[in-house]
Image: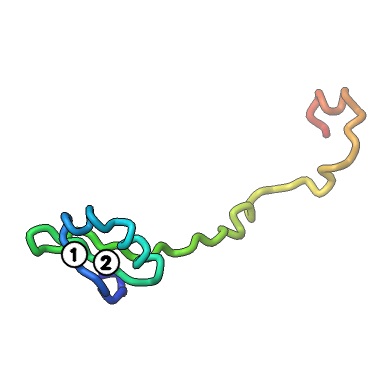
């Protein structure tokens, strides 16, 4: 399992009839196992909060003068700027 203690087990038929209640239980931190013919087929567990991925631009090279005026069109066309 995923390290969660299974708090509730129900059959597919029961899960169809009380899906909203099962979602509420998972939101409250419980783990729910849905079974078919007595065998576990699905575990519903609370989703992990998504964290921003810092450092994803760390290898991006940025010109330190990126905001300087670009008035020399000829130099720009030559690729000097």
Question: What label does residue 20 carry, if any?
Answer: none
Give the Cα separation between the discs numbered 2 and 1: 8 Å
| Residue situated in front as seen by the camera: 74 or 32 | 32
Q: Quadrant of residue 12?
A: bottom left
Q: Position of residue 77 (x, y in %)?
A: 81, 23
- Is residue 9 shown above or below 59? below
Q: Position of residue 79 (x, y in %)?
A: 79, 29
Furthest-bottom residue in view?
Answer: 5
| Residue situated in front as seen by the camera: 53 or 28 | 28
Q: Residue at x 50, y 60 (%)?
A: 50
Residue denoted by label 2: 32
Residue denoted by label 1: 10
On the picture, is 15 further left or further right than 50?
left
Q: Residue at x 81, y 49 (%)?
A: 64
Q: Position of residue 38 (x, y in %)?
A: 9, 64
Q: Quadrant of residue 9?
A: bottom left
User: Which element type, helix, strand or loop, lies under badge 1?
Assistant: strand
Of badges 2 and 1, the one in the foreground is 1
């Amino acid at each position: 399992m995923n390290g969660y203690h299974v708090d509730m087990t129900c059959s597919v038929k029961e899960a169809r009839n009380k899906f909203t209640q099962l979602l509420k239980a998972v939101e409250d931190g419980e783990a729910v196992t849905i079974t078919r013919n007595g065998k576990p087929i699905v575990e519903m567990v609370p989703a992990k909060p998504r964290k921003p991925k810092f450092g994803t631009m760390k290898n991006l090279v940025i010109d330190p003068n990126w905001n300087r005026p670009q008035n020399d069109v000829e130099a720009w066309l030559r690729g000097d700027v």
